Amino acid sequence: MKDLKTLTPLTKILKEIQHINSAIALMGWDQETYMPLGAGQARAEQMSFLKGLVHEKQVGKEMSETLAQFVDLETGGLSGDANDWDEPASACLREVWRDYHHATCLPSDFVRKLGLETSLSHQVWIEARKKSDFSLFASNLKRIVALKKEEAEYLGYGDSPYDALMDRFEPGMTIAQVAPLFDALKAKLVPLVEKIQLSSVVPRKEIFQTYFAEKAQIEFGEKVLQAMGYDFSIGRQDLSAHPFTTSFHPTDVRITTRVDEKDLLSSLFSSIHEGGHGLYDQGLSVAHFGTPLGDSISLGIHESQSRMWENSVGRSKPFWKHFYPILQKTFPEQFEALGVEDFYSAINTVGPSLIRVESDEVTYNLHIMLRFEIERAIIEDDFPVEQLPVLWNDKMEAYLGVRPENDAEGVLQDVHWSGGAFGYFPTYTLGNLYAAQFFNQAKKEIPNLLEQISKGSLLPLKSWLNEKIHRWGRQYSSQAMVARVCGEAPDPAYFINYLEEKFGEIYSLT
């Protein structure tokens, strides 16, 4: 039986490629955190060069000749009898060929050009967002959109060019699958939002609109991260304009948060959310670093980890039974006289929000659907980039009943388009669906999980996720992983039931 040792010549090349990708990721992390503003042009050129180098190694003679020893380069079929390969080796070759096939579709010059444009555009987006002026970013975005359409043509697609872009983040996912799912979800969410708006219950969200010292916020967030099992000896947390997680190796994982001294929740839940991503990256196999078996499955599965920790755990009653007394000691002036029930209701307030990352669990997916529709309009229907602010504001008003007063709280709020990440947003909703189903299964398999969480014992859940999901890398697809862990295919009913039960109790809904 042929196993991973058979693939040693191939894994050697893969690790070399990953070392360069890690250097690119380190440059990207620095660009978001500590890089001086004046270094933008030079950094863009450096990253563009390295991305081009990675692409050349991905499609070069050494890779093609080595990979050809194990698979048919045209079809990806395994050499010899497929039954001769064990499951890990077979999965590794399947994923390496998928990556190779995608890479060979894209010319090196195109990869460099896209890399340079996205790196430069990121700096422009930061400035445009700071000045709340979309016109400063519009030209860059037009060039990115043109490049992403070109990329879709190179990659090929069936029904829509958007499918090709979405596949980069959630392999195998198409509009034909996502659109009906979103429609069904919206059919449940809109009535739930309406019921909540009619409820006489009004959580005391104003308690968070006071002063919270930055240092104390960060320290409390780090206490929670440590309880979650985020290992600060192989990780760190810094500040950035848009919270994110990046990994150079399972032993070097970085997360960021952002702090608003007049809004406790922004930093706290950003830390927990990114901590969930960080636990996934720290839980990947060191032995398989550089290969698909040492990589995460998809953005949807990755998002399921962050949303589970942020919402299923971090916004739950059991969690705050333990952590609220600690928060009261951290901010006695603000919370000493406030009961945990009022606090719990306040952190789960449902209402229209302009900012996606600060929205509640119920309305969050409406933000995603809005972006999904806008991206399709841009990619499929050539919607004019210059008119995006108006389209964005109109859809915000239609979906959530609020209208942004400026570009920073509207079309410029997300970093994704500056990096060319069209097709990324749907993975957020998929992550919510996967998270609810995974957590439901964890409650079945971990004895007294909620009771353990109420005592501040979060490591049993982390260990369960390490064992069930993280350590497998890309051996299974996202759909297969959900079925493997939960014993059934992905089912949105778990998420809907979770929302209706939780918010039905908070808002006294019948």
Image (cartoon, rainbow, N blue to C red):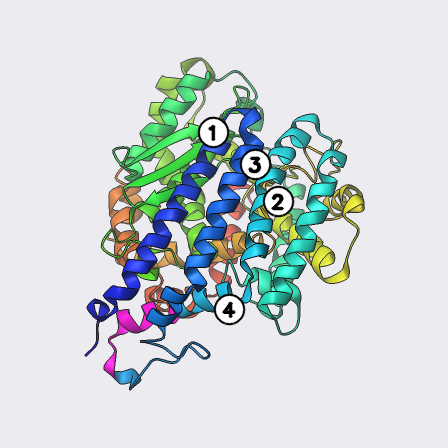
The single residue placed furthest to the front in the displayed view is 61
The amino acid marked with disc number 1 is: Thr
Residue placed at 49% from the left, 27% from the top?
35
Mark 3 nearby-residue class (10 Å; few <14, some 14–19, many ≥20): some
Q: Which residue is mark 4?
A: 172
The local secondary structure at tag 2 comes to helix
Q: Is residue 190 visible?
A: no
Looking at the image, is mark 4 or mark 2 nearer the viewer? 2
Residue 45 spot, x, y in % from top left: 54, 40
Q: Earlier in the sequence, mark 4 or mark 2?
A: 2
Q: Is residue 497 visible?
A: yes
The local secondary structure at tag 4 comes to loop
Mark 4 nearby-residue class (10 Å; few <14, some 14–19, many ≥20): some
Which residue is nearer to you in this view: 332 or 417?
A: 417
Q: Quadrant of residue 341?
A: top left
Mark 1 nearby-residue class (10 Å; few <14, some 14–19, many ≥20): some
